[in-house]
Image: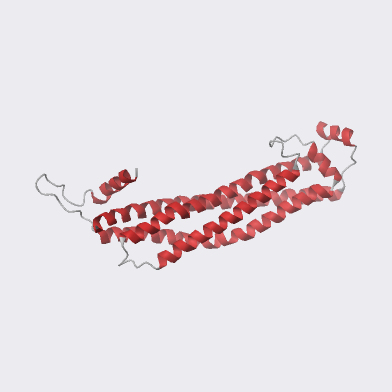
Amino acid sequence: MKRSLIVAMSLVVFAGCAPQPTAQVPQKACMNAAQLNSYGYDHLEKVAKLLREDKKNIEAFDGFIATMKGTVDNYADMIKSSVYISNVVRFLPIPYAGEVSNTTKLVSKTVLNLGGAASALNRYKNSSDTFLTTFDKMNRTSVSGAEISKLAVFADTKLLNDAKDLENSLKDISESTAAMAATTQGISDALESTGNYVNQAKTFVGFSQPANDDKSKVVQNRNSINTRMAQLSQKIVSLEKSGEAQRLNIAKARIYSELAVQLEK
């Protein structure tokens, strides 16, 4: 597969810029290693530029994870602080694999996902810093194909993988946060309605009418969770777009540099 990719790129690079070789007189390639290295360097430079542009957004992830943890803690406190709310949760007809009625499990899962995202974020930061440090040491006019190839391979196998792990970790948070949001909305609906399942719950557990403080807590938690989910969605989309752009430039840098290495031999 790798060899086929190089051959395909060779055709793109060399086709049309030199006469076709005859059986008797083979023609030399119209691009030399220096030119190919320059192209490879250009694409790594684009990767570096994107990483620097993303740096502020990535740094903001630390604050977001901490804020998200606060939202989860507030959610847990809301359930624990009100007998009425904790009883309502037990009767909510929301199918989330049984986790809606088990708020402790839901909170634990979200906290675990937040920890995974924090670890993934640190790995991505480290691989980004390694890439930028290595790239900044390169000189466009003297860099070799082997040097470009080594950094491009690192970006392809480490940097992109770390970015994808972070993206997947955020998606895990999004999934468990969606369950929290569904629970909170169900609680809010229950406090404002006299549906059959709420009446049934009253019969079984005999809980009284909710206090205004309960309603206020639920509204605040619902709004906070919905805000965090919107922010989370934006961050996931941003990572996806950045990953697509990075992947294309890294692939081109790998191909150009591998062709240059062949000519440098």
In the rendered image, the quadrant that contains the N terminus is top left
Residue placed furthest toward the left: 24
Residue 61, horizontal then vertical, whole percent: 60, 58
Q: Quadrant of residue 36?
A: bottom left
Using residue 105 as the reference point, say whether residue 45 is left or right of it.
Answer: left
Q: Is residue 75 visible in this depiction of the protein?
A: yes
Using residue 204 as the reference point, say whether residue 117 is left or right of it.
Answer: left
Looking at the rendered structure, the number of numbered marks drawn on it comes to: 0
For the point 36% across and 53% down, the residue is: 254
For the point 51% across and 53% down, the residue is: 162
Q: Is residue 245 visible in this depiction of the protein?
A: no
Residue 163, horizontal then vertical, whole percent: 51, 53
Residue 85, horizontal then vertical, whole percent: 82, 44
User: Relative to residue 43, is residue 184 depicted above or below?
Assistant: above
Residue placed furthest toward the front: 265
User: Relative to residue 139, is residue 208 depicted above or below?
Assistant: above
Foreground of the two, 65 or 233: 65
* Colour approach in the figure: secondary structure
In the rendered image, the quadrant that contains the C terminus is bottom left
Residue 232, horizontal then vertical, whole percent: 61, 51
Q: Quadrant of residue 63?
A: bottom right
For the point 28% across and 53% down, the residue is: 259
User: Relative to residue 201, is residue 112 depicted above or below?
Assistant: below
